[in-house]
């Protein structure tokens, strides 16, 4: 079955016109997730012609490439994706592209090589590596090197963009770490409960314990026992807020809240959804990686009623009115 699907795909790829290949001198880049597309914009700037496949709110665990996605990847020089099986439905397409000599690059690759990938269980990597900004710095540098290789005439441009961005990510990391570990937040209360296990790197980076109702993938539905276990945790630890993720159905979070409330707990959802596997739309706050991290940190702090420290001016962000520190 898998081989048949691959054959059909290869035929489709072979039939697609190659006339678009020399249409312009910018590198033709395709990015799968919203995070990958944002990084491509930051590092590639005007030197690349970018096609972003997934939009805000789309779950990459479940997303299946469309025919137009496949056509765009077929005409690309570089396809960048997150990797570690996040884009589980792309495997066959990537294999076919590899045979057509399209460069396919996983942003997680340098993070994996550096040994910073967490495992859910032995041998099963947790794909949500971007949530530690220090990992995203490695991804930025890795992408700059790939672009420099494919477009050697502008290698300095890509590397300079990566260097400037890494400095911005360092500022972001320092701010978020200080905000999330403020002494006003009791250590025992630093528990983040969300729809699925996307926040372990985030928790590692910023000193919080995390618990997802579903595991590291949204492919399997949350079991009744998983909902009961998280409800137990909420009751036992007195957790007052749990969070819906923008790319995951709120049903499981609501089920946990109902189960915990039935046992007398006072628990509510966060004042906004968190961005996890998808960022916001480009025109909303949370539409870039940096904004996504700030959005999540501010949303978590405000939802629990903690103060939000001022943002470093060098990040040059305009917080929406509702995000302002109290
Ligand atoms: Zn996920």
Image (cartoon, rainbow, N blue to C red):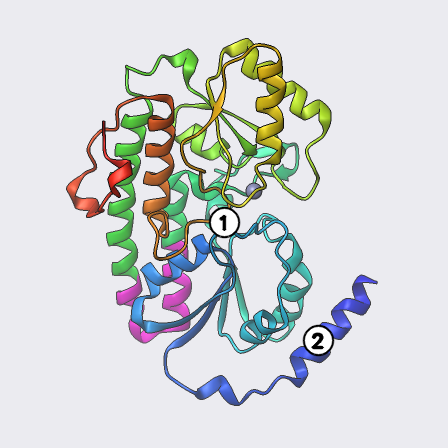
Q: Of helix, strand and loop, which one carries label 2?
A: helix
Query: On the rendered structure, is 76 left or right of 176?
Result: right
Residue indicated by mark 1: 108
Tell me if label 2 and label 1 are in contact, CB under 8 Å. Answer: no
Residue name at image x 50 percent, y 56 percent: 33
Where is residue 325 shown, x and y percent of the image? 23, 30
Instruction: Name the residue: 79% across, 62% down.
Output: 2
Q: Residues within 10 Å of mark 2 (few under 14, many from 20)?
A: some
- The reply to whether the residue tagged 2 has its Cβ within 8 angstroms of ligand 1 is no
Q: Give the farthest residue toward the right.
A: 1
Vertical order, 114 against 261 (above or below): below
Which residue extends farthest left?
A: 313
Q: CA distance from mark 2 to mark 1?
A: 26 Å
Q: How many other residues sit within 10 Å of disc 1, few (<14), some (14-19) or many (≥20)? A: many
Does the magenta portion include 144?
yes
Report x, y in % for residue 205: 39, 31
* In magenta stretch: residue 18: no
Residue stretch rendered in magenta on the structure = 141-158
| Image quadrant occupied by the N terminus | bottom right
Q: Which mark is residue 120?
A: none
Up-down relation of residue 224 to residue 63 (above or below): above
Q: Which residue is mark 2?
A: 10
Q: Quadrant of residue 196?
A: top right
Depth order, front residue of 63/303: 303
Q: Secondary structure at mark 1?
A: loop
Q: Write the residue at 37% across / 57% down.
A: 282
Q: Earlier in the sequence, mark 2 or mark 1?
A: 2
Magenta stretch: dominant secondary structure: helix
Q: Is mark 1 within 8 Å of ligand 1?
A: no
Query: Residue at the location (26% across, 66% down)?
Result: 156
């Amino acid at each position: 079955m898998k081989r048949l699907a691959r054959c059909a795909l290869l035929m489709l790829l072979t039939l697609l016109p190659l006339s678009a290949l020399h249409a312009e001198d910018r590198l033709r880049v395709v990015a799968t997730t919203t995070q990958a597309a944002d990084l491509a914009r930051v590092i590639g700037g005007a030197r690349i012609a970018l096609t972003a496949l997934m939009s805000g709110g789309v779950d990459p665990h479940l997303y299946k490439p469309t025919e137009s996605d496949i056509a765009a990847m077929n005409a690309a020089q570089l396809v960048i994706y997150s990797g570690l099986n996040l884009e589980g439905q792309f495997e066959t397409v990537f294999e076919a592209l590899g045979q057509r000599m399209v460069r396919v690059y996983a942003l997680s690759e340098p993070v994996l090589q550096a040994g910073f990938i967490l495992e859910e269980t032995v041998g099963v990597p947790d794909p949500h590596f971007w949530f530690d900004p220090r990992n995203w710095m490695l991804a930025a540098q890795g992408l700059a090197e790939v672009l420099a290789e494919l477009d050697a005439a502008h290698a300095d441009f890509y590397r300079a963009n990566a260097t400037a961005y890494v400095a911005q990510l360092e500022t972001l990391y320092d701010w978020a770490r200080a905000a999330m570990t403020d002494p006003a937040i009791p250590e025992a209360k630093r528990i983040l409960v969300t729809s699925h296990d996307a926040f372990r790197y985030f928790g590692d980076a910023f000193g919080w314990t995390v618990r997802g109702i579903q595991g590291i993938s949204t492919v399997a539905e949350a079991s009744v026992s998983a909902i009961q276990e998280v409800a137990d945790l909420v009751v036992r630890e007195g957790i007052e807020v749990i969070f819906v993720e923008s790319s995951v159905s709120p049903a499981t979070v609501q089920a946990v809240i109902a189960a915990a409330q039935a046992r007398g707990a006072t628990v509510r959802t966060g004042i906004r959804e968190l961005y996890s596997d998808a960022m916001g739309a480009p025109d909303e706050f949370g539409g870039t990686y940096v904004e996504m991290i700030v959005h999540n940190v501010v949303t978590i702090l405000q939802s629990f009623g903690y103060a939000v420290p001022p943002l470093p001016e060098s990040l040059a962000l305009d917080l929406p009115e509702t995000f302002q520190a109290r």
